[in-house]
Amino acid sequence: MPKCIVAEDEALLRDALVGLIREAWPELEIAAECEDGGSALEAIAEVQPDIAFLDIRMPGLTGLEVAAATMDCSPKTQLVFVTAYDQYAIDAFDQGAVDYLLKPVSPQRLAQTIQRLKARMENGPLDVAALTALLARLGAAPRREAEASPLVWITASTGKETRLIMVDDVLFFRADHKYTVVMTEEGEALLRKPIKDLLAVLDPDRFKQVHRATIVNLRAIASVTRDDTGKGLIRLRSRPETLTVSQAFMGLFRNM
């Protein structure tokens, strides 16, 4: 029985897509429904699904970044991007070996995509070269919608003191139950906000999720090494702490 995961940050659109998939392909097991890129990547690494339906624009990791990491952690997984992009991106998809669904997803288009997916599953694993070329093209695609300005500063507490911290000065964020530890060169503070809520408001070009509990400032990284289990270890430029990179997220550092 083939398996898939569905990643879409908008709950109504995710529920609608899941409903369409179940109607069009009853034999396909939906193993996970994810609301952000990090949870999608972890689900792919754990489930090793035959197919992943990925919204391109999600909090934290984008669908493109999840796809790039999938080449390492689950190379058999066929990818379908769900997109509201303009014609530039659609042209890129039409020249590649990866399928796409344009929002709002129609039953007719989904049926065509499923036919192609079944054929690709029979023909073998994902075409890594074609996907790499596609991701390179899409990385330069203009975005239709204006991006919201990323978070610039936060207030976090250190004991009884409340500090105003510029986000550029944050080395990493780490989940601590319902709160988040904020680490700067001066030390740690506590933010009364769960880490998952930060994913949508941080600059995605600066901050990357490397573990379900950790977001790191890329400019704070001195080095990344991989151990025998496939996990990674980040050494920081200005702090002695080291950060663990989940095996699923190591694909993000393939070009470092």
Image (tube, helix red, strand yellow):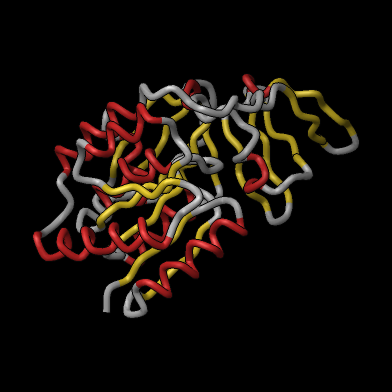
Q: Residue 178 at x, y = what percent?
A: 73, 54
Residue found at x 49% / y 70%: 19
Q: Judge whether 222 appears above or below 35 on screen.
A: above
Quarter in which the C terminus is drawn: top left
Between 210 and 149, the one lying in front of the other is: 149
Q: Residue 221 at x, y = what percent?
A: 44, 26
Residue 169, quarter of picture: top right
- Horizontally, is 28 left or right of 213 in the view? left
Q: Residue 49 at x, y = what percent?
A: 31, 65
User: In this rendering, does residue 155 appear at all?
Assistant: yes
Task: Report the label total.
Answer: 0
Between 145 and 251, the one lying in front of the other is: 145
| Residue lying farthest to the left in this orientation | 123
Residue found at x 25% / y 58%: 77
| Residue lying farthest to the right in this orientation | 160
Q: Residue 17 at x, y = what percent?
A: 48, 62
Residue 114, quarter of picture: bottom left
Quarter in which the N terminus is drawn: bottom left
